[in-house]
Image (spheres, rainbow, N blue to C red):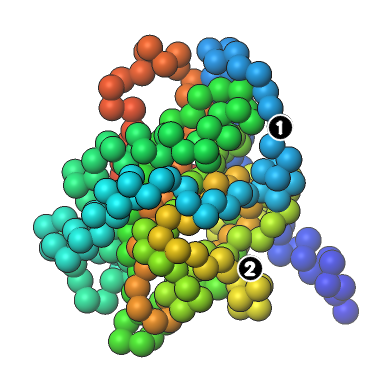
Amino acid sequence: MISLKSNKIFRRIVSYRPDRFIKGIIANFTATRRYSLAKKNNPNILQKNNQLSERGFLKFDKIIDETKLKKLTKINKLFQKNECCISYSMGKYTNGITKDADATYIKNEFISNEFISSLKESDAWKIIEKFHGCKFYCRQLSIFKTSSKENVPQGSFRFHRDGHPPFSYKILFYMTDVDFENGPTAILPNSHDYKIIPGFGKYSYDRPIDKDLYIKTAIAGKTGTGFLFNTNVLHAGGRTTKGERIIAVLILHPMWFSESNLPQFEMKKDVGSIEYDVF
Ligand SMILES: [Fe+2]
């Protein structure tokens, strides 16, 4: 009889992925190098934020002020315009709005730079810059909507880590009111400090379903509720059982150029592009 522990070890060995191991090592090395360059170019005083280090995430009742929020949420109307949207369903993206989409994204060209500049002034952005002692930039922005399909729940209870290189963060914010039915994000506190060997199956590609944990850790909030989280923290996407939900997700990385060398348009906005997912 194989014990539970040895069974677990066995499963990790058989799920070994040499390609992910190599990519993970490269990503780690590159991230560490970029971070040290970023710190060199931005020699600020390092200030610890205990909540962020201990819990792995921070929640903000209002991530930006009311006036900015009103301006930014005007983008929600674009979800009714076919030419402004890309739909995602069964691993494929289709231009326009499709009825059976798992998620609908706003196309890059319809997202203004004001979106990033408003968030840049938020406490969330300032906190990680102080925390790490260097500037951060937005590497990717996605604005998307999830809906229940004719009362069939969409989304999942799958918890995962994003598999991003070290020093990556996400700002996620609700562009509509989110209750326990239209797709709250679930985040498990204190779960980010987890050492892992890339390629040995414990990150994105091993996403256990945990309904009880999802219900326990899902966070409802009004429009403008925001989260800053370490991409290593265990989280689950919103499960929409009724109505719809719109959220914006920004991926932030240390700015390893000096600011003066940065191109005017610093952000790479890939609609629904696949995240790193290498670990
Ligand atoms: Fe994720």
Q: Which image quadrant for residue 109?
A: top left
Q: Which image quadrant for residue 129?
A: top right
Residue located at (27% from left, 36% from top):
113
* Lower sequence index among marks 2 and 1: 1
The residue labelled by disc 1 is 48
Q: Would residue 19 be seen by someone viewing this image from the given angle?
A: no
Residue 125 vertical placement versus 90 (above, below): above
State the SS at label 2: helix
| Residue placed most toward the observer, 167 or 185 | 185
Where's the N terminus, which quadrant? bottom right
Rendering coords of residue 163 (x, y %): 56, 48
Label 2 Cα neighbours within 10 Å, binned few <14 / some 14-19 / many ≥20: some
Rendering coords of residue 22 (x, y %): 58, 38
Question: Relative to 267, is 232 on the left or the right?
Answer: right
The residue labelled by disc 2 is 217
State the SS at label 1: loop
Q: How many marks?
A: 2
| Three-letter code, disc 2 | Thr
Q: CA distance from mark 2 to mark 1?
A: 25 Å
